[in-house]
Image: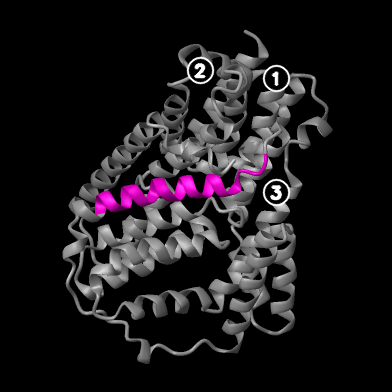
Amino acid sequence: MNLAIISLIVLVMVVAIGFIKKVNLGFLSLGVAFILGTIGDMSAKEISNGFSSSMFVTLVGVTFLFGMASNNGTLELFSKKIVALVGKNTVLIPILMFVLSAFISAIGPGHIAAGILMTTFAMYLAFEMKINPIATALYAKLGANAGCASPLSLTGVLAKSLSEPLGYSGFGLHLFLSTLISGFIFTLILYVAFKGYKVKADNPLKLSEIPKFNREQRYTIIGIIVMVVCCIGFKLDTGLFAFVVAAVLILLGCADEKKAIKSIPWGTLVFICGVGTLINVINTLGGIELISNFLTGMMNEKTATPILSATSGILSWVSSTTGVVMPALFPIAADVATSFAGSVNYVELISAIVATSFAAAISPLSTGGAIIMSSYSAAKETTNHELNKMFKQLFLLSVGNVLLNVVLSALGLFNLGGLFY
């Protein structure tokens, strides 16, 4: 048995252990990467080169800044003010949950932070308004997932870091729009299925009763706006500029530095970079090429995108999009694009991979679905029967969302007419 096959078996074992034991795959992957790389005659430097220090710094900077914005109440108060603007037009609440979550996710916090904030907020708001809490929370979580592939957010940053070594760049807007459109289509389907257009309730949030932004919150908003303008308009490094804004806010006394540091998802960052290190070792040992050749043998020009789309959805049910799916499938997408000599586009492939993987992320086996279930249980006393019913409902919706994205892949949606690359 050659090292390429062994490396793939090891990857499957690592993911299985993480899924069963609920341990952080990042730490496990780093240890396994060292052992596997040493067996494959790789030096310690070659192994550690797979740990992307630039990506780690970027992710720390962004999450640190938005940890401040969360801890000083800026994001929560902003959300409440937007919902209050709806007034009596409560039929707009479902769509507003999606749009607001997508916006907050896109400007930096990403799908995890925005998902937790907005899903919890949506759940409690739904109980207050006496509307469907699961549907309302789903709109929020789908929005957080749909907006997270922006160039400023964790997923967008990761996509760039993974793609540049493969020779691809300049696709940020395409990836963002394709993920956003995918999420919005499924949200509209749920909006009709749950009869969101018939929502009639009293909005408990009155703009006149919500406090104004205080000094610290105003400065935080200004800092975020400046970062968005400079990073998108002037192409400055997102992570490093986030540190600049964070430093200014600390000097102005706008946030508690210790709380912001504690809010950085260190486990998630080690997860992403640790698995990336293992994937790099597997790639060096020929494992990625082996999978690419296998998948390419099953594909033709028309089936390449839907096959990779389905693969990403299935993987996302048992692993993390940013931690496992993207690092594993992006190199394969590059090989597939090369194999078909330009008739299959890399950007379309990774757009389908990201969108479909996040489509699966409302499953209760993932963070998204787990947040919805825990928020529901926290807001209302819940029986085991209700929890089991919720689990089944969320998983079936996740399956439906993945199938939808596979169909959209087959129809060429993720190409977006080639307008943005």
172 in the magenta segment: yes
Find disc 3 in the rendering and name its residue: 55
The reply to whether dot 2 and dot 3 touch (C-beta < 8 Å) is no
Marks 1 and 3: in contact by CB < 8 Å? Answer: no
Q: Distance between the residues labelled 2 and 3?
A: 29 Å
Q: Say which label, 2 or 1, has the lower sequence index.
A: 1
Residue range in magenta is 169-190
Task: Provide the residue designation for mark 2.
Answer: 295
Q: How crowded is mark 3: few (under 14 residues within 10 Å), some or many (20 or more)?
A: many
- State which quadrant residue 108 falls in: bottom right
Question: Does label 2 or label 3 sit earlier along the sequence?
Answer: 3
Q: Mark 1 points at which residue?
A: 285
Rendering quarter of residue 383: bottom left
Q: Which kind of residue does numbered mark 3 sit on?
A: Met
Q: Residue 144 carries which label?
A: none
Residue at horizontal 57 percent and vertical 36 percent from the top: 347
Question: Front-most of 365 and 226?
Answer: 226
